[in-house]
Image (spheres, rainbow, N blue to C red):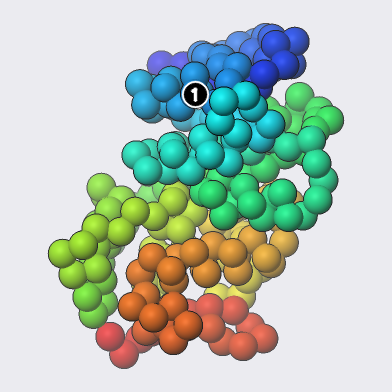
Amino acid sequence: MAKKILVVDDEKLIVKGIRFSLEQEGFAVDCAYDGEEALEKARLTNYDAVLLDVMLPKMNGYEVCQAIREFSQMPIIMVTAKSDDMDKILGLEYGADDYITKPFNILEVKARIKAIMRRSAAREDAAAPSTRLSAGDLTMDTESRRVFIGDREVNLTAKEFDLLEILLRNPGKVYSREKLLDVVWGYEYPGDDRTVDVHVRRLREKIEPNPSDPQYVYTKWGVGYYFNSSL
């Protein structure tokens, strides 16, 4: 079955070009030209990837990304015309998995989409020693990709979940930011250390009783992060 991609941009010529190129690769492509249309289509279809422009009518890309994250972990690549680091960080803050800056090369777009799909497939195919992990009040089901603190379910983005899983599976082991970028995002990911810091901060806000004094995810100053092994 063809992989399904949603392309969202209000510039119809750009959408037409991307759609043509992706369909030549064998993808099934849906298109949306404003934020509300994109969100409606994302609710109806579980896409293998969403290419989401930031500047959109009705709802901007950040709002669409945040809304999608309330019901789905489908991979989202944000597209921005700006090269400012803050725009990239904002995309990650709202739950995007990757970003790309206009003007872009269509070959790069296809490479990013394929990389996300490879990582997703690798995670699905990997034989996990256990599908249920727990520490203290935290419980993780890696098969359904759900996380609970006590009886309360915590809604994590795909990358937040992946970060927590690798740390929880290896309590006490310190992972450098570079290693986490490699394992969670893939060696070809062009981001930097701040990508990891942003995701860890958002993860702590969701799972820690007191994010400024964490009991689950610890910082090894000057090195990286690790999960509390005493729980």
The residue pinned by badge 1 equals 36
Q: Quadrant of residue 23?
A: top right
Question: Pointer 1: residues within 10 angstroms few (<14), some, or many (20+)?
Answer: some
- Residue shown at 51%/35% (left/top)? 64
Q: Label 1 sits on what residue type?
A: Glu
- Foreground pick, 93 / 133: 93
- Residue shown at 22%/75% (left/top)? 137
Q: Quadrant of residue 205?
A: bottom left
Locate the N terminus by quadrant: top left
- Foreground pick, 94 / 228: 94
Q: Does the rendering let one see residue 96?
A: yes
Locate the C terminus by quadrant: bottom left
- Residue shown at 64%/27% (left/top)? 56
Question: x and y percent of residue 90 in the render?
Answer: 64, 52
Question: x and y percent of residue 38 in the render?
Answer: 50, 23
The secondary element bearing badge 1 is classed as helix
Q: Quadrant of residue 222?
A: bottom right
Question: x and y percent of residue 165 in the render?
Answer: 39, 63
Above or below, comparing residue 177 to residue 188 in the picture: below
Question: x and y percent of residue 147 in the render?
Answer: 28, 59
Q: Residue furthest left?
A: 151
Above or below, comparing residue 227 to residue 28 in the picture: below
Q: Residue furthest front?
A: 58
Q: Does the rendering let one see residue 227?
A: no
